[in-house]
Amino acid sequence: MISWAKPNLLKKDLVHLNRAFKSNWISGGMYIDKFEKELQKKFKIKNLITASSGTAAIHLAYLAIGLKEGDEVIIPGFGYLAPANIAKLLRLKIIFSEVDPNTFCVGVDDIKRVITKKTKAIIVTHTYGNMCQINEIVKLAKKNNIFLIEDAAEALGSKFKNKYSGTVGDIGIYSFQATKNITTGEGGAVTAKNKKIFEKLKLYRNHGVTRKRYYHVVPGHNFRLSNLLASIGYSQLLRINKIIRNRKIIFSIYQKYLNKEKFTMQVIKKNISFVPWALSIKINNKFNQKKRDQVIKKLNKKGIECRNGFYTPYELPIYPKKKLFHCLMLSRRVICLPFYEKLSLNKIKYICLTLDKLL
């Protein structure tokens, strides 16, 4: 079976993991600090802390900006729904927006259609490594005095006009889950431009405790990353340029061998420097969801693990049945092909040839 994703862990990573293990600092430790500082350096971030997951980082962001029950937030209707799930747990009022059917990302006009005077935060998702046209959304958020949160869990290293994903809005979210560009197994990070918000992020991450042990300033949580996991992330971060280069090469090889007559690829605009997390294609409108799912099943039988597009809120019982045409279309027609750093040329050729025959 050709896996959909596969981490590329090296002996160097094991060296750092062993150092963390032998230090006896299993929870906190020097690698937390090293990993955070290296992330700040590589991606030109002033304020950053790690977290136990990207989803935990989203939760921290909501708490730090003071969102409370009933507050209105805008979230794209296509993309991984972690921001919506945490919003629902906190009993926020979720307003889902449409997305661009070509880039798969939310646009400023999509947000303008649903923004109200009650909107407290806008969450944008940089889906599959692509980035939305964030500058226009920043202007809209500032004009309306609304917090802008970038979910860059899938877009570590991608740039919009030389600005890294997660560094343009008020708050940025990263994920280091097993399939991501850099992986710690589970893990994440959160950034904030405002110093006061950043201090709140740190406070809520650590049980609401500052320097005075066992004294809880706020009802915080434990969203800390372990020293062992941070050591693996730190080791990979030292070769991040090579990781990015390899992922771009894999993407370009796919572009060469894919027969694009029966589908379109995610559109990456010229002002985006794209670091692909996944390779997604949108099959043409001759295929309904049932036929798309049949194609995925047949690919699996041929030894090629593929995934469907994200489900929309409309299709899930936990959310209101607001129908978003473009989101629903993407949910029913997107196929994500295997994509990872060590995917060989022969395997890519086999995937492309098999897909072409099935379509």
Image (cartoon, grey):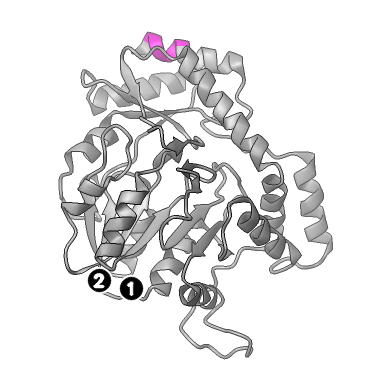
Quadrant where the image shows the C terminus: top left
Quadrant where the image shows the N terminus: top right
Element carrying mark 1: loop
Q: CA distance from mark 1 to mark 2?
A: 6 Å
Q: Which amino acid type is shown beneath numbered disc 2?
A: Asp
- In the image, what residue occupies the spot 30% across and 50% down? 136
- In the image, what residue occupies the spot 30% across and 57% down? 139
Q: Position of residue 173 (x, y in %)?
A: 47, 57
Q: Compared with residue 72, is residue 206 higher up or lower down, i.e. above or below?
A: below
Residue labelled with disc 1: 67
Using the rendered image of the protein, determine whether residue 137 is visible from the camera's viewpoint.
Answer: yes
Q: Position of residue 232 (x, y in %)?
A: 70, 51
Residue labelled with disc 2: 71
Number of numbered tags placed on the structure image: 2
Q: Which amino acid type is shown beneath numbered disc 1?
A: Leu
Q: Compared with residue 90, is residue 273 higher up or lower down, i.e. above or below?
A: above
Choose between 164 and 88: the one closer to the eye: 164
Q: Position of residue 215 (x, y in %)?
A: 57, 91
Choose between 11 and 2: the one closer to the eye: 11
Determine which quarter of the picture holds residue 294. top left
| Bounds of the magenta segment | 353-357
